[in-house]
Structure formats: C-alpha cells, structure tokens
Image (cartoon, rainbow, N blue to C red):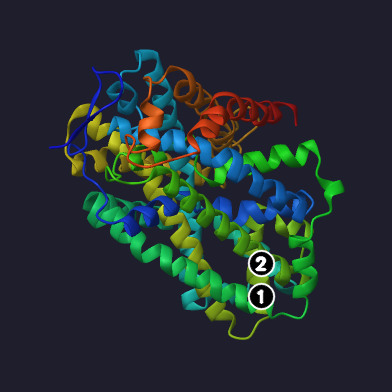
Amino acid sequence: MIKFACNNPNIFVDMASKIQFASKIGMIAATVGSAVGLGNVWRFPAEVQANGGAAFLLVYVACVLLLGIPVMLSEFALGRAGQSDAVGAFGKVGAARPWKAVGGLAVLASYMILCFYMVVAGWTFEYLLQSISGGLLDPISGETGLHSHYAAKMDSFITDSVNPLVNTYMMILINIVVLIAGVRKGIERMSNVAMPLLFVILVLFAVVSLSLPGASAGLDYFLHPDFSKITPGVVVNALGQAFFSLSLGMGILITYAAYYPKDTRLVQTSVVVSLLDLLVAVMMGLIIFPAVTTFGLSGEGMQGATLVFVTLPEVFAQLPATQLWAILFFLLLTLAALTSTISIAEVTVAFISDKFKIGRVKSCLIVLLPLFALSTVCSLSMGPWSDVLVCGMNIFDLLDNVATNLMLPIGSIFLCVYMGWFAPKGMFKDQLTNFGTVRSRLYVPVLFVVRYIAPLLICVVLVSYFIR
C-alpha cells in the first residue's frame, strides 16, 4: 500500500485503494474516448459553418490550449488526489461539505445527459445496421431526390415509437456489458480497440475527401481565416465548443483520473488528450468541408443531426462504393457515441459504488437499468410525445439545455474556484509535479488561468445562453 500526503498533514491519499488503468496507452485511449464524441463529429463542423469557417477554427484551437488544458488539469488533479468519484474526491481531500455539491452537480448533469445521449447513440446504431443491410437506400413514399430521401428517412426513424427504442435498448445493454466488466477489462479494453479503429476510419475518409474535385474550395474555407469574421459571438461559441468537446464539468475527468497510476504525468496527459481530441475535430473538418463543397451541400444541411443523417449520406450516395462509406462512417459514429456513453455512465457508477460501498455489478445495474424507462421518455418526446412541452421544449431538448448549457458551466466555475482558491495548500502543485519528482513550468500559468481567467470566460459562456 502506497500513501502520499498533501502539504496538509491530515490529508492522506491511498494510491492502492482504487483500481488503476493497466497501461499508459489504455489510460490515454479511455480518456480520449471520453472526450471524443458527437460534439466533435457533428457539432464542431456545424459551429465552423455558422461562425466564419477558419476564423472559428483559429479561436477554437486557442480556447482548447489556453482554457481547456488548465481546466482539464484541475479536474485531473482533484481526481487523482481524491482517489474517488466526482463527489467523494472533494471529501477525500478535506473540502468542506458544501463543496461536495459541486461534484453532485456534475454527477446529476452527467446522468441527465446520459438519458438523452443514449437515444442519440441508438440512432447511430440503427444507421450502422441499415448501412450494413443496404436499407439506407430503400425507397420512401413521396420522396424526390437524395436529400428528400434521407431527410424523410431521418424524420421517419427519429419520430417512430418503436425502432428508436429498440436501438436505444441495444446501446444500453452494450454499456451494461462493458461497464460490468470493469475499468481494465471493460472500459480500457474497449477503448484500446475503439479509438485506434476510429482514427483509422478518420484517416481513410480524409484521404478520400481531400481527393474530391472541389476539395480546394472546402479547404480554403476551413483553413484560411478571414480575421474580420472573429467577433465576440464567434469567441463565445468557440469557448462553448471547447468546453463541450473536452467533456469538462461532467465529472468524467475527475472519475477517470482516480484510475490513473501514481506516476502519471498529468500535464503531459492533458496536452496529449486535448491535442488528440482537437485532431478528431480538425479531421472531421477536412472530411466534411471538401465533400459538401464538391457536391454543393451546405447551409441547413450542416446543422446538427441533419449533417450526419442527411447531408453525409447524400455525399456517400454520390461516391463509388456507397454502402462501404456509409458502413465505415456510421461505425465511426457508433464508436464515438459508445465511448462517450460509457464514460458518462461511469461517473454515476463510480459515485454509487463509492458512496454506498457496493459492488460494481450492482452499481452498474442501479445506474443503467432506469435508463430503459428514462431514455424511453426522451425518445418518445421526439415523436408521439412531442406535444408534451416544458418551458416550450420537449423532454429531450429540456434535458439537453438544462444539463449542457446551465449545469455544466456552473459546476465548472465552482470547480475552478475551489481548485484555485480553496483546495489544500500545495495539492494542485503536488499533483502536477508528482510531489516534486517532475518539473513543470506550467503550474504558475495554469493556476492563474484556473483562478482568474477560466471562471470569467465560463461565466461569459453561461450568460450568453440567456441573451441569445
């Protein structure tokens, strides 16, 4: 048993009390998998399209490096120091009881997100199955042209009362199997397969897209910034995208950091994870913008679910080997959704297990079995129950807005305040330097960002939600 102490002599951390990732590669793969998700695949290209192309990309990269990494480090430091779940970590490092509410907010927000994210994961799984069977091109009554075909197919599927539920339940079952297997045999093993495969598919798509006739125009839009388009609104949107794509404020990074070996270099890990997450987003841009430029698809077709379920299948239909590209793309999308749902679910699984001192199997079932009912409500709110509105939103959109636009930013603000001002003296520095065994010149600037810059900028993102 190995124990380390912070500068506060009453705070000891038992580094052997928590199961750890078996390898550095597995640790990185799992953490990158927790960040890479639909935010990279469909939200990022849509934000680029809506916010001036390369101008947005430039600001987004700056936000990831200057804001995302410091906030990520604060979550890593708390998680590894506390060796517990998102709530328990505060208690383990000696935080006063009110601070545990910050962790509680992260757990609640992540579970709310899981309820509707599992539905979206079900959509991706259905499209993967349809791609394999060839059903994506099955005729639909009244359709005229490719766009109408895929738009009608998406609307028909999402609003259906049965098929989305079947696929959602399948994704829940897959999550149960992986999570019950544990951190090493479940999360890490799955990530070691899923993440390399995801990057291979991305590279393949990028090569094909960049060889299209209209690739140069798409690349120009994506990579050559018009600085006049950098406005306060673009900066705020880039901040929000960086915050969302790195999974900040959800408790995932705190939870996963508790599984990090004691010799893990947190600064190095945060940089690698952030750059790989950024790479996925950039590669999606290299895939999408040359393709949509070549085939004259843009505007409304770049928005959210329409991009991946309508616009991109339209592109694939105009390429040789349509079915192959559809299978590969929706496999990529399903992998991204799966790694995300598993990491989000692990936040609550770890909390239940640590809080009530019960085994992993019971914790997984307590967390995931209710989703058969809760995700059902979210799915049906897109179709038969779409008339049931709260504050003008259906249940799906309500959970999305409250959790991602309100709870996550609020939780992150308080986390930064705690780590910057109220954490035990020396704890943050001890974690970033592995108790002085690793030199890190970033501690001072990181602490400055966490204390002053990050809370202010996250407040701006939060306020912007109310004034749009």
Q: Can residue 40 be seen by looking at this rendering?
A: yes
- Horizontal and vertical percent position of residue 156: 59, 59
Left or right side of 459 for 298: right
Quarter that holds the C terminus: top right
What residue is shown at x 83% (from left), y 49% (from top)? 227
According to the picture, the residue beneath numbered tag 1 turns out to be 209
Residue 286: numbered disc: 2
Q: Can residue 159 be seen by looking at this rendering?
A: no
- Horizontal and vertical percent position of residue 249: 48, 34
Above or below, 216 against 195 in this view is below
Residue 270: numbered disc: none
Q: State the residue lying farthest toward the right.
A: 228
Q: State the residue lying farthest toward the bottom.
A: 320
Q: Earlier in the sequence, mark 2 or mark 1?
A: 1
- Horizontal and vertical percent position of residue 254: 38, 36
| 42 and 70: which is toward the camera | 70
Q: Secondary structure at mark 2?
A: helix
| 143 and 54: which is toward the camera | 54
Kind of residue sitting beneath label 1: Ser
Left or right side of 445 for 300: right
Quarter that holds the N terminus: top left
Kind of residue sitting beneath label 2: Leu
C-alpha separation, residue under disc 2 versus residue under disc 1:
7 Å
Q: Are marks 2 and 1 in contact (CB under 8 Å)?
A: yes
